[in-house]
Image: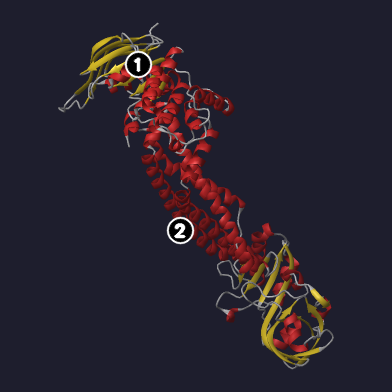
């Protein structure tokens, strides 16, 4: 029998029992759409995590005091300078000092975070200016009391004014505002990225620190694929700078942005796989539903099978007829499931903060999976149909 | 050449391990020439249905040989046998066995769909329409079986049996589910087909129906009891005419 005839025959038999076919495919529809939706949400949250970490800076390496031992901090501005001078795989370096401070100026006061930074900090964090200029080499060298502020700070101190050219007081010392950072909004962790005040590192070390140790040294590697090598290079320079003998552990820690992404998204990845597996189980249950209905169908159509055998159908023809029917049935379910899940994903994007990304490849995979469910669970009923004895089949009522 | 030859045909049912063996056919020798119209008669349990099944290649003998147009069917593999059923045999059943909720035309197309080699769906349609016209149902092609009378259903079944131009039409109690008038219509159609050279073998237990054939084979206990020509076959058309005259008064 020609394949086109087989498919036509399947459609006819499926549409003859519309309600039954719909209920049967419901299992596949639910299975396929839940797999796609789960994976889309999983991939969406992975992308969200990636974006959040990427917004921290580009190709970022962060040198920090060893975890949980801030008293052991030995990072100095000199370390930052040595990295800048000696490292070859690094494009920008800035030591930072971070302090939570109340800033006074304009119409009121505001509790915020002050960062002492060097000029490279702008490139590392990809900050853009809305107005004015960023901290320069001279500002750092001369320990000028100038500041660049974020829009949240500006709004709270100066209202509708930008505040550039005004003076603010940080820990009793007056600082002139020379720049306003372009707003970045909230990151996906809920932190307001605009609630910052940047001042020259040298000034901050004098005004806000009792010792000369830095909070972090932030570094941009030249490219994403050189991150690991850059990390090793920085590690070597710092060990030398701190005169650590070979048998001593590092007295600092380097966080690598790509590693952070990996660690953070691995949790989401595992969760995605878990959800997809649970959804896949419903697909299998859907397949069993198809097998069940196909078995009923074979019994109901025993006489038809007998007639077909009598007019010259080979066992293979009967087998193919029922197999095609179950494949068409599950593919139909697959297609409806795909359309349904695309609708749900679009709805999520529009009406909820949940981000879901549908991978086109995954649509193909789930359609293929639905088809193979049809083959797998249609095989037994089809075999049963093709094994009928024509004489007995013709005699059944 | 004979159309079919059966030599020492036996068909036993039952288990080999101590169970009762039923000898449905117990040594049949039969030869049928092309163009014959044979009625196979016998009481129920005589083995006539088994004989019919073997003749139609739906069943194989336990012992003996069956040649259809010179081909030894007993040695063929199932696919080849299916092919023979498709090309050489047309079945007509007592209970019509049309596919439900399927139009007359599509029912008649069925054997063509299983024919080896590809044919355009248009060619298939045309052949099916031709067969339906031959049984006088050109106006009922789009009707499904439930919209047709028993006689019309049986005529669709005959069209289905004819459509592949088989060498042999096998009819198993073709009038068993029909009233007298419809039975006569069907027999008249059979006689007409026989007149155009088609070979028909019909199983029946009604002597009145058997009288429309040309040769009678009586089977009892799996053996041929009697085999000979019917001296004066009835003409179904005339009987039908007389019947209608009597019943319209």
Q: How many marks?
A: 2
Residue pushed farthest front?
A: B249
Figure check: B144 above or below B126: below
Looking at the rendered image, the quarter that the C terminus of chain B falls into is top left
Kind of element beneath mark 2: helix
Give A97 or B78, whichever is nearer the viewer: B78
* Residue drawn at x 46%, y 51% as measured from the top left: A19
Looking at the rendered image, the quarter that the N terminus of chain B falls into is top left
Kind of element beneath mark 1: loop
Residue with the mark numbered 2: A278
Q: How far from the left and from the top, in percent, is residue A105?
A: 77, 91
Question: From where the camera sits, is residue B167 visible?
Answer: no
> In the shown orientation, is residue A86 left or right of residue A382?
right
Toward which corner of the image does residue A265 lie, by quadrant? bottom right
The coloring applied to the image is secondary structure
Question: From where the camera sits, is residue A239 visible?
Answer: yes
Q: How far from the left and from the top, in percent, is residue B175?
A: 35, 26
Q: Are marks 1 and 2 on the same chain?
A: no
Residue with the mark numbered 1: B212
**Which chain is disc 2 placed on?**
A
Give B183 or B121, whichever is nearer the viewer: B183
Toward which corner of the image does residue B122 lie, by quadrant? top right
* Residue drawn at x 74%, y 69% as measured from the top left: A126
**Which chain is disc 1 placed on?**
B
Q: Nearer the viewer, mark 1 or mark 2?
A: 1
């Amino acid at each position: 029998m020609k394949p086109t005839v087989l498919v036509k025959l399947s459609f006819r038999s499926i549409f003859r029992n519309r309600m039954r076919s719909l209920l049967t495919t419901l299992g596949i529809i639910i299975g396929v759409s839940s797999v796609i939706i789960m994976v889309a949400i999983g991939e969406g949250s992975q992308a969200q995590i990636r974006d959040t970490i990427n917004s921290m800076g580009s190709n970022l390496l962060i040198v920090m005091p060893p975890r949980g031992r801030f008293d052991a901090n030995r990072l100095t501005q000199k370390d930052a300078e040595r990295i800048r001078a000696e490292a070859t795989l690094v494009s920008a370096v800035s030591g930072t000092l971070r302090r939570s401070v109340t800033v006074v100026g304009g119409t009121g006061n505001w509790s915020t975070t002050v960062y002492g930074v060097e000029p490279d900090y702008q490139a590392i964090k990809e900050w853009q200016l809305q107005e004015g200029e960023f901290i320069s080499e001279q500002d750092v060298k001369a320990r000028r009391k100038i500041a660049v502020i974020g829009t949240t700070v500006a709004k709270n101190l100066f209202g509708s004014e930008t505040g550039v050219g005004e003076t603010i007081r940080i820990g009793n010392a007056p600082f002139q505002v020379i720049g306003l950072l372009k707003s970045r909004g909230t990151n996906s962790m809920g932190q307001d990225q605009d609630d910052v005040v940047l001042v020259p590192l040298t000034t901050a070390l004098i005004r806000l620190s009792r010792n000369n140790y830095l909070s972090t040294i932030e570094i941009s590697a030249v490219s994403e694929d050189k991150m690991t090598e850059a990390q090793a290079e920085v590690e070597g320079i710092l060990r030398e700078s701190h005169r650590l003998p070979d048998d001593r552990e590092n007295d600092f820690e380097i966080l690598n942005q790509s590693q952070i992404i990996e660690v953070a998204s691995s949790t989401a990845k595992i969760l995605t796989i878990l959800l997809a597996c649970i959804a896949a189980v419903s697909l299998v249950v859907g397949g069993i539903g198809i097998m069940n209905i196909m078995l009923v169908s074979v019994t109901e159509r025993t006489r038809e099978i007998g007639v077909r055998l009598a007019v010259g159908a080979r066992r293979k023809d009967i087998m193919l007829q029922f197999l095609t029917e179950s494949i068409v049935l599950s593919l139909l379910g697959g297609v409806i499931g795909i359309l349904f899940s695309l609708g749900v994903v679009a709805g999520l994007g529009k009406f909820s903060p949940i981000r879901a990304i549908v991978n086109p490849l995954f649509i193909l995979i789930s359609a293929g999976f639905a088809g193979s469910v049809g083959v797998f669970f249609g095989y037994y009923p089809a075999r049963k149909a093709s094994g009928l004895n024509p004489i007995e089949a013709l005699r059944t009522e | 050449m004979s159309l079919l030859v059966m030599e020492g045909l036996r068909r036993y049912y039952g288990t080999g391990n101590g169970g009762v063996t039923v000898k449905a056919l117990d040594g049949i020798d039969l030869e049928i020439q092309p163009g014959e119209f044979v009625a196979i008669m016998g009481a129920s349990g005589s083995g006539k249905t088994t004989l019919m099944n073997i003749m139609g290649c739906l069943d194989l003998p336990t012992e003996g040989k069956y040649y259809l147009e010179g081909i030894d069917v007993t040695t063929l593999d199932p696919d080849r046998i299916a092919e023979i059923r498709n090309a050489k045999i047309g079945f007509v059943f007592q209970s019509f066995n049309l596919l439900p909720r399927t139009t007359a035309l599509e029912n008649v197309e069925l054997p063509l769909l299983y024919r080896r080699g590809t044919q355009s769906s248009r060619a298939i349609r045309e052949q099916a329409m031709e067969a339906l016209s031959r049984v006088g149902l050109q106006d009922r092609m789009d009707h499904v079986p439930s919209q047709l009378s028993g006689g019309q259903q049986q005529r669709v079944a005959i069209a289905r049996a004819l459509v592949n131009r088989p060498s042999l039409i096998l009819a198993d109690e073709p009038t068993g589910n029909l009233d007298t008038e419809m039975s006569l219509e069907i027999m008249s159609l059979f006689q007409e087909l026989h007149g155009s050279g088609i070979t028909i073998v019909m199983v029946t237990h009604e002597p009145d129906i058997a009288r429309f054939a040309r040769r009678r084979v009586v089977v009892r206990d799996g053996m041929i009891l009697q085999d000979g020509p019917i001296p004066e076959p009835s003409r179904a058309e005339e009987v039908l005419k007389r019947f209608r005259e009597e019943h319209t008064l």
